[in-house]
Image: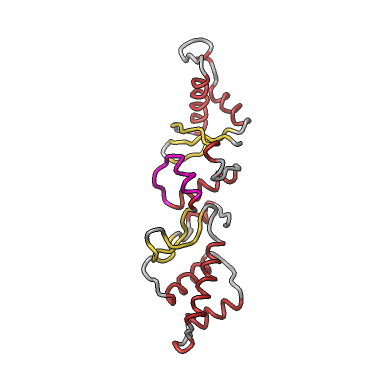
Amino acid sequence: MTRYNDEQLSAFPWIVSCDTLKTENLLVKFWGITEQLGIKLSVPLLADLTLLVGEDAKESDWNDQLASDSLAELNDALNSAAPDGFQFSSQDGDGACFGFWLQDDWVEALAHLGLGDWHSEGWAFLIAELIANGIDPETIEDSFLGQVEAVTEERAGAAYAEQLADELGDYKPTQWPYYCIDWEQAWRELSFDGYWLQSTGGGDWLVFRAI
């Protein structure tokens, strides 16, 4: 897997091919994506691809075994270039649709967040943030603390701090001194203890704690 920045993920070619299973066509499409992603292929593989499907390729030069081996090498190269949490393969249920799909362990882990159906780009952004904060599929369930709604990150943090105080018990929001508490400051204190927020858009925030 490969780490990409936000700009690269925004332009990432998530779907590579969905209309053919012909090896000669897949070779062209897979090869094109390796060039788009800047993947360096071996000199022998480039020579084989040029012979098989290059601009000057001849029908008499076609070799089924060589083509199959070259396609497998391209598949491996693309899989190695998959963003964190993804793999390059055909889609489950559609063997003719090739692209970059969530790995099974991340599918299960992200389902725990209850976010519904997102585009691959959105999942990639979220996974990158989770990994940057030391969270993986095995730890996400213990790290995830819930969701809050707020316009800004500061207000989201304050809302969670107040929610946590309520969960801890004896919190009476209408009584002194509870209504005097600076909940944004309370959240800043929590953030020093490993709590952090991740926006999912539309004023919704996920709450995590590093473990």
Apparent side of residue 92 relative to residue 7 in the rendered image (left or right) = left
Query: From which residue to which does the magenta span run?
Result: 105-119
Q: Position of residue 116 (x, y in %)?
A: 39, 43
Q: Is residue 9 above or below residue 164?
A: below
Percent coordinates x, y for residue 157 in the rendering: 52, 30
Residue visible at 50% across and 27% down in the picture: 160
Examine the rendered structure and indicate whether residue 17 appears above or below residue 133.
below
Residue at the extreme right:
192
* Rendering quarter of residue 130: top right
Q: Quadrant of the C terminus?
A: top right
Answer whether residue 89 is magenta in the image. no
Residue 150, above or below 172? below
- Residue occupying image coordinates x 48% and y 24%: 163
Q: Nearer the viewer, residue 179 or 115?
A: 115
In the current view of this chain or complex, which residue is farthest to the bottom? 60
Q: Nearer the viewer, residue 90 or 147?
A: 90
Q: Position of residue 141 (x, y in %)?
A: 52, 38
From the viewer's perspective, is residue 89 above or below residue 27? above
